[in-house]
Image: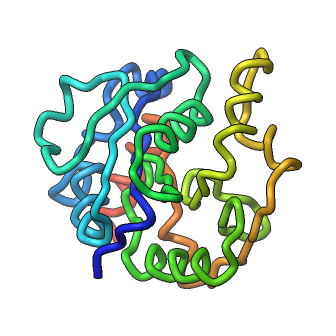
Amino acid sequence: MINHDISLAILAGGKSTRFNSVNKALLPIENHTFLHKMVEQIESLFDDKLLITNRKDEFKDFSNFIITEDLFNDAGPLAGIYTALNKCKGSAVFILACDMPYVQRSLIEKMINLFQEYKPDVLMPLNNGEIEPLHAIYSQTTKRNIEKVLRFSQFPAIRDFFYMSNIHNFELDESEQNYVININSLSEYQQHIHESRYT
C-alpha cells in the first residue's frame, strides 16, 4: 500500500572520504548497487520520494525520485534531514542513509505503523540500545529546531535537537538488527564482500 502522508528520503550527499571519494551509494553488492538494492525493497511504499545528494549527475537512473541538494553545505546528515523536511510533500519523512543495503520492507512498514500510532516528533529504532537516527521517521514538527541547530552550531550533530523533541524509541528484534547495518568505509565494504562470498 502506498503511503501518501509520509515521504521517503535517502541521504546520499556525503563526500565519501572513507571510500576514497567513490560514491558509496553506487557500489556493487549482490548483483545490485547499494541504492538499487534499497530502492527495490521499499520504493513502492511511498508516493513522494527524494534523493538528497550533492552529486546529482551520478543519479540519473533514479527518475522516480526528486533529486535535490542540501540546503546547508558541509553540515553532515542533519542538513540532509532538514532538506528532506523542506522539500518533501508529507507531514513526515522516512530518512534512510544510502549505506544501508539491507533495509527491509517489513521493518519500514512496522515503523510507519508505529509512527501513525504514537505520533511522535521522531520515531527511531534502537539496535542493542544504540540509536539509529538514519533509519528513522521525522515529523515536520522537528524542522524549526533542526534549523536552529544548523544555523547556530559550529559542528551540528543529529543529537543536538533531541532534547527539544518527543522521541519514540523501540528496540529492534534480533531478526531485524541486520536490516540497519551500514557500511562505513572501504575496508568494511571489502571485508563484507569477502565474507558474503563464503557464507
Q: Residue at x 62, y 35 (%)?
A: 78
Q: Position of residue 162 (x, y in %)?
A: 81, 49
Q: Residue at x 22, y 53 (%)?
A: 36
Q: Position of residue 55 (x, y in %)?
A: 30, 23
The front one of 158 and 20 is 158
Q: Residue at x 48, y 78 (%)?
A: 107
Q: Residue at x 57, y 61 (%)?
A: 137
The image quarter in which residue 4 lies: bottom left
Quadrant containing the C terminus is bottom left
Direction right: furthest residue: 163
From the viewer's perspective, is 111 left or right of 44? right
Quadrant containing the N terminus is bottom left
From the viewer's perspective, is 145 left or right of 23? right
Judge whether 37 appears above or below 2 on screen: above
From the viewer's perspective, is 154 left or right of 99? right
The front one of 110 and 116 is 116
The image quarter in which residue 168 lies: bottom right
